[in-house]
Image: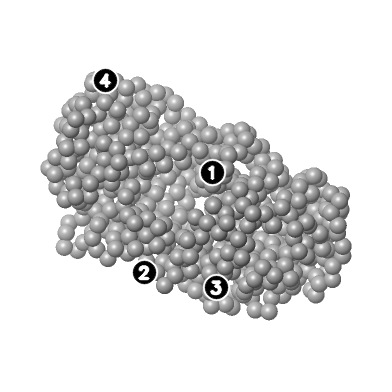
Amino acid sequence: MLGGCAASAPPAPSPAGAVPARAPLYIALDVSQEGALARLTRTDAARVTGAKQPYGFLYRLLSLRGGSAPRSAVLPFLGAQAGVFLERMPPLEAANGSPAALIAFARSILEGGLRHLAGAAVPGALIADVTDPGGARAYIRRQSAGLHARILPFGGVKMTILSDGQAAAVARSFLLMGNIAGVRSAIATIDGAPALRPASPFAAMHAAAPTGAVAAVYLRLPSRAEASEAGSEGEAQSSSAQSESSGSLTANPKAAKGARSSGRAPASAGEPPYLRELIGPPGSALYVSLVPRSGSIRLVVDRLRGESADPPSTSESEQQQSTQQLLASLPESSWVAAALENLPDALHKVLALAPALAYLSGAAPSPQGAASGSEASFRSAPLPFTAGLQALLGTLAGLGGSSLAGLIAPARQLVGALGAHPRALRQALAGWMGPAALFLSGTSLLEVDGAIVISSRDEARSRAAVAQLGALFRSAHIAVKPLSVAGAQSAIAVALAGLPGGLQIAAGEGKLVAGFGAAPITEALSPSVPLGSATAYRSAQSALGEGLSPRLLISFPQLTAILGLLGANSSPSLATVLPHLYSLSSLTLGVGRIGSEQRTAVVLSLTP
């Protein structure tokens, strides 16, 4: 495991000790091939991903010739730990928030090996601890044979440089492979330049991370001061790398060490919305740990907020407690249950991440400027820009095909009606919205109930909101009629094409509920048995551990059953996902604080 060692052997040096302190991205891997943890990782990874060889990407990274390195050639000298770092973040599309370039960059390396990093203007390298440095050097000679390799010295280390810009070397007990600038930086760090491991905030986040991780990702956004230095440093390093590939390699790493003594991480100016929403303001850092357990996989995300980040106030703590109570008040029969401390902020995050979903699903990226427009308008509105929601619904429609068409069409009709009068919508929703929750329940299509439940800080305003929303729908020529529901002080039924029973909206019991199905309002306002008393809820709390409270629960057997009834197998996108979902029993997501860090944990329980 990362940072661990066998009791009978001295600790292997951590690859993080060879990573430049300024690196904004570092991925640590436990690559041990033997032992219970390795076998558990292979078994769980194969069940969830369907991959027969979870370590396949590692052998692609270890090849200088393309394809995969032979396992028999690597295993004799490969140690238990490896890591990959980038000394600068690649260019990011800050204008429209699409992660196309970033994802394509990562895919090219994971699928095609480090030779795709050779031509990039981003210094980076793989670092692997080796048990036999001589064997690793012999491996480099075999890999570079016939590839017009040159041997150039750098700080007492012989670097093998290929004509395409790849470089490889063995420095002390580390195998280094990457582009020239990346390998050179690693050598200089090993020789004494500031390293990532003792640097803050990495050291503190690594120490606070859960034990037993087989993979970890550290990602830090630069501060504003660091970002302002990025351009000149990037040009200098690019020029240096070009001179090295032509044969004039500086032989003294002390110069490189001095150039990086500040340990600052340059980055592209203006991070895109999806990174800001995932990590935080400039200077914030993210540390993700993947921890396998018998029968489950745990993903832990720690965030350390940077500039403009204030500690939680008493009101925020009360909001978190209210959110947990709202989740516990949902129906026990829910197979999807989620709670949100701030519904507008959550929708904003969804929109910020929507271009990533669109790109990964194969849909076209959002138009230039669309995401930034929705983001700007959102800050002054209780709901995000409706064009962004329509684009997200379009992506979901593309993913689900005909199986989700019956749900997407009425949702689009609903969003279109609300977006036609943004000022009236703001007035209807302003001043009363507290934490929100949503649920799906039922075992057949005719019995499915689903609703969004918003706690009210001002019951008079939330009751008035029901009538105001009804007026918005009528102005869009959608039929609206009064509804009588036990426990509701004000209620309406909205007729939406393709949705039997339409949408029901009601206010009562300190909540506003908007739902569909047989009895969504009754289930939301006064469930016969609340979720908080269910065994599944108590199991979720136990799985998350101390200090974390549930925010999302999914039961996959019920979810996959409903997707099957909707015809998900006929959708090419969903048909490829369903086999992986069948291997899962449940998902639990929880949030909390561990010291100064914000922690989010996801626990995937596997089917027996």
**In the image, what residue type sits under mark 2?**
Ser
Quadrant housing residue 162: top left
Please give the residue where the numbered disc 3 appears in the rendered image: 537
User: What secondary structure is marked by label 1?
Assistant: loop
Direction from residue 303 to residue 14 in the image, left or right? left
Q: Horizontal placement of 245 versus 508: left or right?
A: left
Q: Residue at x 31, y 25 (%)?
A: 241
Q: What amino acid is found at the position of numbered circle 1 in the picture?
A: Gly
Which residue position holds label 4? 246
Q: What amino acid is found at the position of numbered circle 3 in the picture?
A: Tyr
Nearer to us in this view, 49 or 6: 49
Q: Which mark is residue 429?
A: none
Instruction: Judge left or right: residue 8 versus residue 382.
Output: left
Using the numbered discs, state the Cα–Cα distance from disc 3 to disc 4 in whole angstroms: 62 Å
Q: Is residue 51 shown above or below 237? A: below
Q: Nearer the viewer, mark 3 or mark 1?
A: 1
Q: CA distance from mark 3 to mark 1?
A: 35 Å
